Image (cartoon, grey):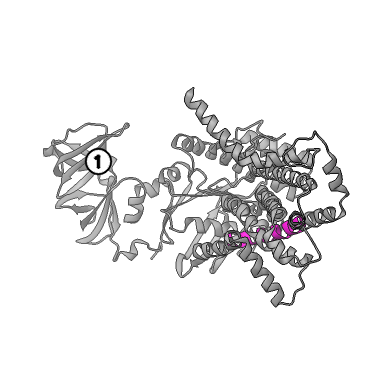
Amino acid sequence: MNDNKLINLVNITKSYDNTVILDDLSLYVRENEFVTLLGPSGCGKTTTLRIIGGFETPDKGQVVFEGKDITKLPPNERQLNTVFQKYALFNHMTIAENIAFGLKIKKKSGDYIKDKIKYALKLVNLDGYENRMPNSLSGGQQQRIAIARAIVNEPKVLLLDEPLGALDLKLRQDMQYELIRLKNELGITFVYVTHDQEEALTMSDTIVVMNQGYIQQIGTPEKIYNEPENAFVADFIGDSNIIAATMVEDRLVNILGANFPCVDDGFGKQKPVDVVIRPEDIDLVKPSEGILTGRVTSLIFKGVHYEMEVMAGGREWLVHSTDLCAVGTEVGIKVDPFDIQIMNKPASEDEQAVVPGE
Amino acid sequence: MVKNFFKRFYIGIILLFLYAPIIILIILSFNKSKSRAKWGGFTLKWYAELFQNDDIMRALYTTLILAFVSALIATIIGTAGAFAINAMKKTPRVIMLGITNIPMLNADIVTGISLMLLFVALRFSLGFTSVLLAHITFNIPYVLLSVMPKLKQLNPNTFEAAQDLGASPFYAFFKVILPDIFPGIISGYFLAFTMSLDDFVITYFTKGPEINTLSTKIYTEVRKGIKPEIYALSTIMFTAILLLLIIANRKSGEKNIPLRK
């Protein structure tokens, strides 16, 4: 990955029927990067992708591709290809005709097209499917054909709009690995849209978390997971305990009446903050060794771990642990200082959606 | 076993009552005797006479041209209309579909008389053109009816996917969208063709004195007393319509065939 900004969205604003979908959004994608736009439905992620693809025109702002303004360029003149959520294969054409569609428009020779079809089908592990019709394939196979149809055109960027949304869990996981492999083999830039945080964490180089038309946080999967910038990100990415607390002084935070050492400083003294503690970062110890004490109120076996709820300091704490503590057990709660993530409190409900840097 | 027998018996009875009149008609068309009560042996005489009757042949020609042209124009208007209606928001779409269904639900006689009154009011002389316009009018809803479901099934991303792959909107429409809904258009055309072929009442009121379609011709003949030629003609019409309907059904079912050589 180098630092070339391949796609640059500058101050994009878009609204439909007086509803603002995107508000002054700026974002860039580097060459060869796997960027995921992540957020709940209606957050503007698909609209952002459609603006990059040319299917929507922003009300304000610019789309810059390789240094050129392409805001007004129609989709058929952009060097990008899209994989749609519902495959959008051409049902009256064979698989080979589907894949050849873009190449025929570009007037490539018959031999070239034949080779490309073979190569693309091999790449998506569907050799020999040339003469099948789309309706005779399973959902996962159709999606792989849609990907093959897009990549034969050798786009600089592949846009993927929740391409795995319609597939079942097992297939989705297989396809995630397949997509990572494809990206590494082809060396092209991926812009991926999903509402599935696990998918985003697994595949991305960079995750852009969006909500209500605003970017909430941009960062690597590790950064987004471990150091969420606000309560929305913390809540959206994985399970978490988000607790109102007070920063007593640098490196010491008071959570529900107990002082926890932490690693953050610069928040000031006696400042109200939110803390995020991931359920797997909470250690359940003997009551005498814990910073807070509580009682286990529920226990669920989840396969990899147990999910427990512990009543302590007047609220429920979600805890994931491989050690079992029976319901009713008195336990102590301990958290390592670097597992406590401190976040500034939003001043109001609306500020849940803050523009980074503000 | 017994249950199965009754099931078949029941269906057999229904089919018999439905088709008995037509079967009798077909049998009579091959009857050598002019009598309707007596079988005088097999003959193709009536068919031969039918094809020598200039009046009837002219009516057949008018009917076919009328069906062909009215179905073609109705298919073009109906398909374009289906696209427009499909693109509407929900409430206007429901209202539009309701309005376009009226010619189909309305009693033929009402449609026929009102069209005639309209033509007369507009000082439009009754003749081939007026019948053609009338047929186009009542054919459009049938085209809408068969094209709309195909449009609904269409993945909204298909058109965008084609453009994404480099197709101009024009190329994408003709290469991707139209072929995808083509079975619906074809079955709409055949349905309209059949309806036009079939119509008597509306044609009767809008045709004027100079021209006759088969159905109006038969009607005038019948008043003079039925000739066995008419049985032969009816048999041919029935067979033709049956064939058309089979083709139309085949066409709309064709999408389900997964493999293609």
Span of residues in magenta: B67-86
Q: Quadrant of the C terminus of chain A?
A: bottom left
Q: Residue at x 69, y 39 (%)?
A: B24
At which x and y percent is residue B130? Answer: 74, 67
Query: x%, y% of residue B14?
Result: 56, 38
The structure residue drawn at horizontal position 21% and vertical position 56%, both measured from the top left corner, is A245
- Toward the viewer: B180 or B117? B117
Q: Quickly name the residue at label 1.
A: A319
Determine if the magenta segment contains residue A209.
no
In the rendered image, the vertical position of residue A356 relative to residue B118, given as above or below = above
Task: Say whether residue A118 is left or right of residue A295.
Answer: right
Query: In the figure, residue A247 lies in which quadrant?
Result: bottom left
Q: How many marks?
A: 1
Secondary structure mostly seen in the magenta stretch? helix
The answer to whether residue B77 is magenta is yes
Name the amino acid type tagged 1.
Val
